[in-house]
Amino acid sequence: VPYGTLASSDRLQLETKYSIDVHCATGEHGKVMSVLKQYAEDIVSNLGDRFPNVKTVSCFDVMSPSVIPKDDALRKDYGHAELNELLEWYGELVTEDGTTYPPIIKSKVLVQWDHWKDSLATRGVAGRETELDVTILAHELQNELNRDSYTDLRFLILVKVSFLLTSVY
């Protein structure tokens, strides 16, 4: 859970794995910290409920641009086992309280994955420093992954970014 320090009369600096500036009215920093603390606790709780199996959470690790191999041969099947496990989690019908929900992702996510990781390597983005992962993923979500051809992979990358931002695992 992040903690804060008062940087000026109207600015609160949050110390987390990633630097976050929160601007608030003078004297409101206590309220802001309370809301942020509750928000972080709720995210951690919800992620724990959604992913009771830590192995499933670790499947998202392959989506960090820093660990995607630059080498074509190593990259070919990289991440397939993990995406297949995520397909088992997100790719099936779910029935809850009498309502059936369609799968969130489909098997085409593997094709999207292969295309995207090759695109990262071609553009020189794969295998870069870990500290750049959030920045790279945010840029990819706004650009490359914002295309209709990446709908399933985009969902998984958004989940990955949520994990990175909350530093839960």
Image (cartoon, rainbow, N blue to C red):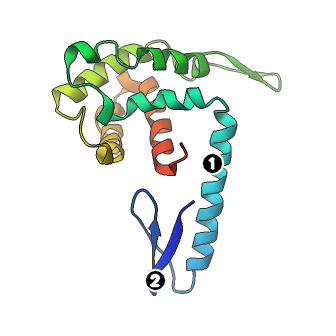
Above or below, 154 relative to 79: below
Above or below, 124 relative to 17: above
- Judging depth in this view, the residue of 76 and 156 nearest the camera is 76
Label drawn at residue 10: 2
Q: Residue at point 24% right, 32% down?
A: 126
Neighbours of disc 2 within 10 Å: few (<14), some (14-19), many (20+): some
Amino acid identity at mark 2: Asp
Q: Quadrant of the N terminus?
A: bottom right
**Which residue is labeled 1 in the image?**
44
Label drawn at residue 159: none
Determine the image quadrant of residue 101: top right
Position in image of residue 20 (x %, y %)? 42, 64
Residue 39 placement, left or right of 142:
right
Question: Which of the marked residues, 2 or 1, is nearer the chain's N terminus?
Answer: 2
Position in image of residue 97 (x %, y %)? 82, 27
Q: Residue at point 56% right, 86% down?
A: 27
Secondary element at image label 2: loop
Residue 80 placement, left or right of 121:
right
Position in image of residue 43 (x %, y %)? 62, 49
- Residue lying at the far right of the rendered structure: 97
Q: Residue at point 31% right, 48% down?
A: 131
Secondary element at image label 1: helix
Residue 29 placement, left or right of 9:
right
